Amino acid sequence: MSTGSFRAVIVDDEPLARASLIALLARDPEAEVVAECGSGGEAVETIRALRPDLLFLDVQMPGCDGFEVLERLGASAPKAVIFVTAYDRYAVKAFEAEALDYLLKPFDDGRFARALERAKAVVRGGTSPERRLIVKSAGRVTILKTGEIDWIEAADYYVCLHAGGKSHLLRRSLTELEDELDAAIFCRIHRSAIVNLGRVREVRLDANGEHEILLRDGTCLRLSRSYREQLQDRLKRT
Protein backbone atom coordinates (compact mmCIF):
# COMPACT_ATOMS: atom_id res chain seq x y z
CA MET A 1 0.00 0.00 0.00
CA SER A 2 1.42 3.36 -0.97
CA THR A 3 1.88 5.93 1.79
CA GLY A 4 -1.35 7.73 2.66
CA SER A 5 -3.34 5.82 0.03
CA PHE A 6 -6.08 3.23 0.50
CA ARG A 7 -6.77 1.16 -2.61
CA ALA A 8 -10.43 0.25 -3.10
CA VAL A 9 -12.37 -2.06 -5.39
CA ILE A 10 -16.10 -1.55 -5.96
CA VAL A 11 -18.29 -4.50 -6.89
CA ASP A 12 -21.91 -3.94 -7.97
CA ASP A 13 -23.86 -5.07 -11.00
CA GLU A 14 -25.57 -1.66 -11.30
CA PRO A 15 -23.44 0.99 -13.09
CA LEU A 16 -25.22 3.86 -11.29
CA ALA A 17 -24.46 2.32 -7.91
CA ARG A 18 -20.78 1.97 -8.81
CA ALA A 19 -20.68 5.56 -10.07
CA SER A 20 -22.21 6.80 -6.81
CA LEU A 21 -19.58 5.02 -4.69
CA ILE A 22 -16.78 6.27 -6.94
CA ALA A 23 -18.03 9.84 -6.50
CA LEU A 24 -18.16 9.47 -2.71
CA LEU A 25 -14.67 7.99 -2.55
CA ALA A 26 -13.33 10.78 -4.79
CA ARG A 27 -14.00 13.22 -1.93
CA ASP A 28 -11.39 11.49 0.22
CA PRO A 29 -7.82 12.26 -0.88
CA GLU A 30 -6.56 9.08 0.81
CA ALA A 31 -8.88 6.76 -1.12
CA GLU A 32 -8.05 5.46 -4.59
CA VAL A 33 -10.47 3.34 -6.63
CA VAL A 34 -8.26 0.87 -8.49
CA ALA A 35 -11.07 -1.14 -10.12
CA GLU A 36 -14.82 -1.48 -10.46
CA CYS A 37 -16.50 -4.78 -11.24
CA GLY A 38 -19.98 -5.56 -12.48
CA SER A 39 -20.07 -9.24 -11.50
CA GLY A 40 -18.88 -11.53 -8.76
CA GLY A 41 -16.76 -13.67 -11.05
CA GLU A 42 -14.92 -10.64 -12.38
CA ALA A 43 -14.47 -9.38 -8.83
CA VAL A 44 -12.71 -12.52 -7.63
CA GLU A 45 -10.12 -12.35 -10.40
CA THR A 46 -9.62 -8.60 -9.98
CA ILE A 47 -9.20 -8.71 -6.21
CA ARG A 48 -6.73 -11.57 -6.39
CA ALA A 49 -4.68 -9.64 -8.92
CA LEU A 50 -4.79 -6.19 -7.30
CA ARG A 51 -4.98 -7.07 -3.57
CA PRO A 52 -6.92 -3.92 -2.57
CA ASP A 53 -7.17 -2.63 1.00
CA LEU A 54 -10.90 -1.89 0.88
CA LEU A 55 -13.76 -3.74 -0.77
CA PHE A 56 -17.26 -2.30 -1.32
CA LEU A 57 -19.37 -5.32 -2.18
CA ASP A 58 -22.97 -5.71 -3.34
CA VAL A 59 -24.88 -8.76 -2.12
CA GLN A 60 -27.23 -9.70 -4.94
CA MET A 61 -25.49 -10.18 -8.27
CA PRO A 62 -26.17 -12.66 -11.08
CA GLY A 63 -24.04 -15.77 -11.19
CA CYS A 64 -21.99 -15.17 -8.05
CA ASP A 65 -23.30 -13.12 -5.12
CA GLY A 66 -21.28 -11.15 -2.60
CA PHE A 67 -21.02 -13.99 -0.10
CA GLU A 68 -19.76 -16.36 -2.78
CA VAL A 69 -17.14 -13.77 -3.71
CA LEU A 70 -15.78 -13.80 -0.16
CA GLU A 71 -15.95 -17.59 0.01
CA ARG A 72 -13.91 -17.93 -3.20
CA LEU A 73 -11.39 -15.35 -2.05
CA GLY A 74 -10.83 -16.98 1.32
CA ALA A 75 -7.65 -15.59 2.89
CA SER A 76 -7.20 -13.33 -0.16
CA ALA A 77 -10.19 -11.19 0.88
CA PRO A 78 -9.32 -7.62 1.92
CA LYS A 79 -9.27 -6.94 5.66
CA ALA A 80 -11.91 -4.21 5.28
CA VAL A 81 -15.07 -5.45 3.53
CA ILE A 82 -18.17 -3.23 3.44
CA PHE A 83 -21.38 -4.67 2.07
CA VAL A 84 -23.56 -2.21 0.14
CA THR A 85 -27.10 -3.38 -0.59
CA ALA A 86 -30.75 -2.40 -0.70
CA TYR A 87 -31.79 -5.45 1.35
CA ASP A 88 -31.65 -5.51 5.14
CA ARG A 89 -32.28 -9.26 5.40
CA TYR A 90 -28.63 -10.07 4.69
CA ALA A 91 -27.23 -8.10 7.64
CA VAL A 92 -26.80 -11.07 9.96
CA LYS A 93 -25.13 -13.18 7.29
CA ALA A 94 -22.83 -10.26 6.42
CA PHE A 95 -21.54 -9.93 9.97
CA GLU A 96 -21.22 -13.71 10.27
CA ALA A 97 -18.95 -13.39 7.22
CA GLU A 98 -16.93 -10.89 9.30
CA ALA A 99 -17.76 -7.86 7.17
CA LEU A 100 -16.64 -4.59 8.71
CA ASP A 101 -19.87 -2.72 7.93
CA TYR A 102 -23.22 -3.00 6.17
CA LEU A 103 -24.44 0.02 4.21
CA LEU A 104 -28.15 -0.16 3.51
CA LYS A 105 -29.27 1.79 0.43
CA PRO A 106 -30.19 4.57 0.43
CA PHE A 107 -27.58 5.86 2.88
CA ASP A 108 -26.49 9.44 3.43
CA ASP A 109 -23.02 10.90 3.00
CA GLY A 110 -22.38 10.94 6.75
CA ARG A 111 -23.11 7.24 7.11
CA PHE A 112 -20.77 6.45 4.22
CA ALA A 113 -18.03 8.64 5.67
CA ARG A 114 -18.21 6.84 9.04
CA ALA A 115 -17.96 3.45 7.35
CA LEU A 116 -14.98 4.60 5.29
CA GLU A 117 -13.14 5.99 8.32
CA ARG A 118 -13.64 2.72 10.20
CA ALA A 119 -12.32 0.80 7.22
CA LYS A 120 -9.24 3.01 6.92
CA ALA A 121 -8.56 2.69 10.65
CA VAL A 122 -8.61 -1.11 10.37
CA VAL A 123 -6.25 -1.09 7.38
CA ARG A 124 -3.97 1.56 8.85
CA GLY A 125 -3.65 -0.09 12.23
CA GLY A 126 -3.60 -3.66 10.99
CA THR A 127 -6.26 -4.50 13.57
CA SER A 128 -9.31 -6.68 13.18
CA PRO A 129 -12.85 -5.30 13.32
CA GLU A 130 -14.43 -5.33 16.75
CA ARG A 131 -16.11 -8.64 17.55
CA ARG A 132 -19.90 -8.61 17.22
CA LEU A 133 -22.53 -10.86 18.73
CA ILE A 134 -25.76 -11.53 16.85
CA VAL A 135 -28.79 -11.78 19.12
CA LYS A 136 -32.12 -12.98 17.71
CA SER A 137 -35.31 -12.41 19.72
CA ALA A 138 -39.02 -12.05 18.92
CA GLY A 139 -38.39 -11.73 15.21
CA ARG A 140 -35.75 -9.03 15.67
CA VAL A 141 -32.00 -9.18 15.21
CA THR A 142 -29.62 -7.11 17.34
CA ILE A 143 -25.96 -6.67 16.35
CA LEU A 144 -24.10 -6.06 19.59
CA LYS A 145 -20.45 -5.01 19.70
CA THR A 146 -18.63 -6.76 22.53
CA GLY A 147 -17.23 -3.43 23.73
CA GLU A 148 -20.79 -2.30 24.47
CA ILE A 149 -21.32 -5.09 27.01
CA ASP A 150 -21.15 -4.14 30.71
CA TRP A 151 -21.33 -7.64 32.17
CA ILE A 152 -22.53 -11.14 31.36
CA GLU A 153 -24.30 -13.70 33.51
CA ALA A 154 -25.14 -17.36 33.00
CA ALA A 155 -28.85 -18.14 32.58
CA ASP A 156 -29.42 -21.91 32.27
CA TYR A 157 -28.58 -22.79 28.65
CA TYR A 158 -28.16 -19.12 27.75
CA VAL A 159 -26.08 -16.13 28.73
CA CYS A 160 -27.62 -12.75 29.51
CA LEU A 161 -25.70 -9.83 28.02
CA HIS A 162 -26.16 -6.58 29.96
CA ALA A 163 -25.38 -3.53 27.83
CA GLY A 164 -26.41 0.08 28.35
CA GLY A 165 -29.33 -0.76 30.63
CA LYS A 166 -30.70 -3.44 28.30
CA SER A 167 -30.49 -7.23 28.51
CA HIS A 168 -30.09 -9.69 25.64
CA LEU A 169 -30.32 -13.49 25.79
CA LEU A 170 -27.87 -15.48 23.71
CA ARG A 171 -27.96 -19.26 23.39
CA ARG A 172 -24.35 -19.94 24.37
CA SER A 173 -22.66 -21.27 27.50
CA LEU A 174 -20.69 -18.79 29.61
CA THR A 175 -17.49 -20.79 29.25
CA GLU A 176 -17.89 -21.00 25.47
CA LEU A 177 -18.45 -17.25 25.21
CA GLU A 178 -15.53 -16.51 27.53
CA ASP A 179 -13.20 -18.27 25.09
CA GLU A 180 -14.37 -15.95 22.29
CA LEU A 181 -14.06 -12.67 24.23
CA ASP A 182 -10.96 -10.46 24.36
CA ALA A 183 -9.13 -11.44 27.55
CA ALA A 184 -7.70 -7.92 27.80
CA ILE A 185 -11.22 -6.51 28.21
CA PHE A 186 -13.30 -9.20 29.95
CA CYS A 187 -12.64 -11.09 33.17
CA ARG A 188 -14.46 -13.91 34.96
CA ILE A 189 -15.46 -12.81 38.47
CA HIS A 190 -17.72 -15.66 39.47
CA ARG A 191 -18.73 -19.10 38.27
CA SER A 192 -21.77 -17.42 36.70
CA ALA A 193 -20.51 -13.95 35.72
CA ILE A 194 -18.02 -12.12 33.49
CA VAL A 195 -17.37 -8.38 33.70
CA ASN A 196 -16.06 -5.73 31.29
CA LEU A 197 -13.01 -4.37 33.14
CA GLY A 198 -13.61 -0.90 31.72
CA ARG A 199 -16.95 -0.75 33.56
CA VAL A 200 -15.51 -1.48 37.03
CA ARG A 201 -15.67 1.50 39.38
CA GLU A 202 -14.41 -0.18 42.55
CA VAL A 203 -13.90 -3.44 44.40
CA ARG A 204 -15.15 -3.28 47.99
CA LEU A 205 -16.36 -5.25 50.99
CA ASP A 206 -20.08 -5.63 51.61
CA ALA A 207 -21.79 -5.67 55.03
CA ASN A 208 -20.87 -9.34 55.49
CA GLY A 209 -17.21 -8.84 54.72
CA GLU A 210 -17.50 -10.39 51.25
CA HIS A 211 -15.95 -8.76 48.20
CA GLU A 212 -18.19 -7.21 45.59
CA ILE A 213 -17.72 -5.19 42.42
CA LEU A 214 -19.44 -1.86 41.78
CA LEU A 215 -19.89 -1.00 38.11
CA ARG A 216 -20.09 2.53 36.74
CA ASP A 217 -23.86 2.22 36.24
CA GLY A 218 -24.37 1.30 39.91
CA THR A 219 -24.69 -2.46 39.42
CA CYS A 220 -23.22 -4.54 42.28
CA LEU A 221 -21.82 -7.99 41.50
CA ARG A 222 -20.43 -10.64 43.83
CA LEU A 223 -16.72 -11.38 43.45
CA SER A 224 -15.86 -15.00 44.10
CA ARG A 225 -12.81 -15.63 46.25
CA SER A 226 -11.32 -17.94 43.62
CA TYR A 227 -11.37 -15.14 41.01
CA ARG A 228 -10.35 -12.23 43.28
CA GLU A 229 -6.60 -12.37 42.73
CA GLN A 230 -7.02 -12.68 38.95
CA LEU A 231 -9.33 -9.66 38.83
CA GLN A 232 -7.09 -7.47 40.97
CA ASP A 233 -4.06 -8.35 38.82
CA ARG A 234 -5.99 -7.57 35.64
CA LEU A 235 -7.25 -4.24 36.95
CA LYS A 236 -3.68 -3.15 37.69
CA ARG A 237 -2.83 -3.65 34.02
CA THR A 238 -5.82 -1.73 32.57
Image: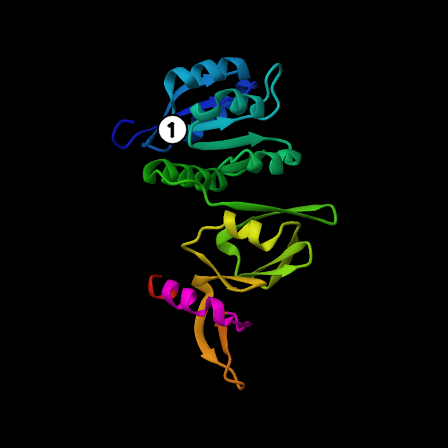
Vertical comparison of 183 with 90: above or below: below
Q: Is residue 15 left or right of residue 171?
A: left
Regarding residue 104, the answer to whether it shows in the image is no
Residue 128: image location, x then y, percent: 42, 40
User: In the picture provided, is 238 more to the left or to the right than 220?
Assistant: left
Relative to the observer, which residue lies in front, 9 or 224?
Answer: 224
Q: Is 185 within the magenta?
A: no
Position of the N terminus by quadrant: top left
Q: Which residue is mark 1?
A: 53
Residue sitting at the far bottom: 207
What kind of residue is marked 1?
Answer: Asp
Give the farthest residue toward the front: 226
Q: Residue at x 74, y 46 (%)?
A: 139
Q: Residue at x 42, y 66 (%)?
A: 231
Query: Of residues 145 and 31, which is closer to you in this image?
Result: 145
Residue occupying the point 57% across, 47% down = 133
